[in-house]
Image (cartoon, grey):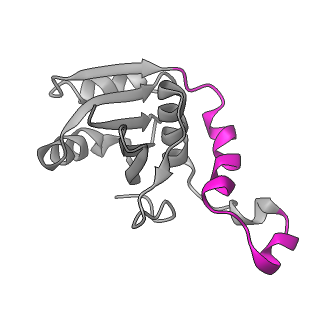
Amino acid sequence: MGRVLSIDPGKNKCGLVLAEISEKKVYKAIILKSELIGDYVRELNTFEDISKIVIGNGTTSREIIKKLDFFKKEIKMFEEKNTTFRAKARYFELFPISGVKFLLPREVFILNKNLDAISALIILEDYYKIKFTLNQNLDFKTWLKL
């Protein structure tokens, strides 16, 4: 089935997740400025065999799709309602709280987190109706490419 790129589109920034469907594993997760998405996906596609792009149907999705006009394979728009809200809960599934930190309110750990890549993951999981795991070397906590 190959690698699929999922995008949570936004006016200023987009969350992106690259996953291998057959392995149910995420290999890349990034947040970048919306204006950079075309160049980033073009470059990524030169060394990753992306078979499909799944993009949330919310904010600026049509503008983002226009920036991806060079991508000659399938681009699917998919429902992204409540993904940002759901990303908070998914964050703690991916990065469970342990030890003494468990006594603190959960919100403390996500106050300054950018959850757009996790929203992109949720879009992908909803589209394929499966849960993905993270590649061992992946760190969802390092973000924003300027």
Residue 59 visible? The answer is no
Residue placed most toward the observer, 67 or 44: 44
User: Residue, x 52% and y 24% (percent of image)?
Assistant: 58
Q: Quadrant of residue 6?
A: top left
The residue furthest right is 103
The residue furthest left is 46
Q: Which residues are magenta?
A: 79-105
User: Residue, x 70% and y 60% (percent of image)?
Assistant: 111
Q: Image check: 30 left or right of 51?
A: right
Residue placed most toward the observer, 99 or 76: 99
31 over 83 or under it: above or below = below
User: Split into 4 quadrants, where in the image is the N terminus?
Assistant: top left
- Magenta stretch: helix, strand or loop mostly: helix
User: Residue, x 14% and y 49% (percent of image)?
Assistant: 47
Residue placed most toward the observer, 86 or 138: 138
Where is residue 91? Give x, y as percent: 63, 53
Q: Is residue 95 magenta?
A: yes
Q: Image check: 78 left or right of 87?
A: left
Q: Image check: 144 left or right of 95?
A: left
Where is residue 141? Give x, y as percent: 51, 64
Q: Is residue 76 magenta?
A: no
Residue 75 visible? The answer is yes
Q: How many labels sit on residues?
A: 0
User: Split into 4 quadrants, where in the image is the C terminus?
Assistant: bottom left
Where is residue 54? Give x, y as percent: 38, 28
Where is residue 35? Give x, y as percent: 31, 41
Q: Quadrant of residue 64?
A: top left
